[in-house]
Amino acid sequence: MAQRNYLCATNYPNMIQRVQSIFLFLASLSIFALFLFPIAHNVYIGPIPKTIMIKGIYQDMGGQMVRTTSFLALTIVSAVMGIVPLVILFLYKNRKQQLALCYGFILVLIGFSFWMSQTVQGVMEGATISLASFGIGAGLTSISIFFTLMAIRGIKNDEKLIKSAERLR
């Protein structure tokens, strides 16, 4: 029985981790979902309701949504932030580095969320957003943080498994 555990533990670092892979992939998807879902919608900045997305401010003109203001830096950073969990995913051979990058990613996500909220407040021009106006995009960074924390938990469990298998030798 001990030999079987030893074989599983030695082969384990050579394959992509199971649970962590799923959580890191979901963290990436939740960041990329910012491109699909609005941060806030039906926000009245002046007489016309507008939709605030990660790519910019959109307004209904003749039944079609037209971007009136662009958030180029926020868009580029969002794309890079969506790629980071995928990069972390493929660093499965070095669990310590993977943990450090996950913790760093969470800190960067917190800063990114703050930047995103400051950008939205900056374009509001004194208008207030009701709770009903917040879109799905407002909570997607929190969901990404949750998935990253779950990945950290899985990486730590793998580290415990490897250490316990080494003790059996």
Image (tube, rainbow, N blue to C red):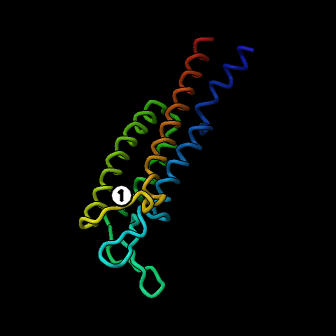
Foreground pick, 21 / 14 = 21
Q: Position of residue 168 (x, y in %)?
A: 63, 11
- Whole-percent x and y of residue 157? 56, 26
Q: Quadrant of the N terminus?
A: top right
Q: Nearer the viewer, residue 109 or 49?
A: 49
Vertical relation: 121 (above or below) 1: below
| Residue that lies at the very extreme toward the top in this rendered image | 168
In the rendered view, tell whether residue 94 sits above or below residue 48: above
Q: Nearer the viewer, residue 76 or 61?
A: 61
| Residue at screen point 38% across, 47% down | 109
> Viewer-proximal residue, 113 or 74?
113
Quarter of the figure with the C terminus = top right
37 relative to 149, above or below: below
Q: Quadrant of residue 100?
A: top left
| Drawn side of residue 80 relative to residue 7, left or right | left
What residue does disc 1 label?
Answer: 77
> Helix or strand or loop: what does disc 1 sit on?
helix
Q: Looking at the picture, how far across and down is residue 147, in whole percent?
A: 51, 42
Name which residue type carries label 1: Val
Q: Is residue 14 above or below residue 111?
A: above
- Report which quarter residue 38 is drawn in: bottom left
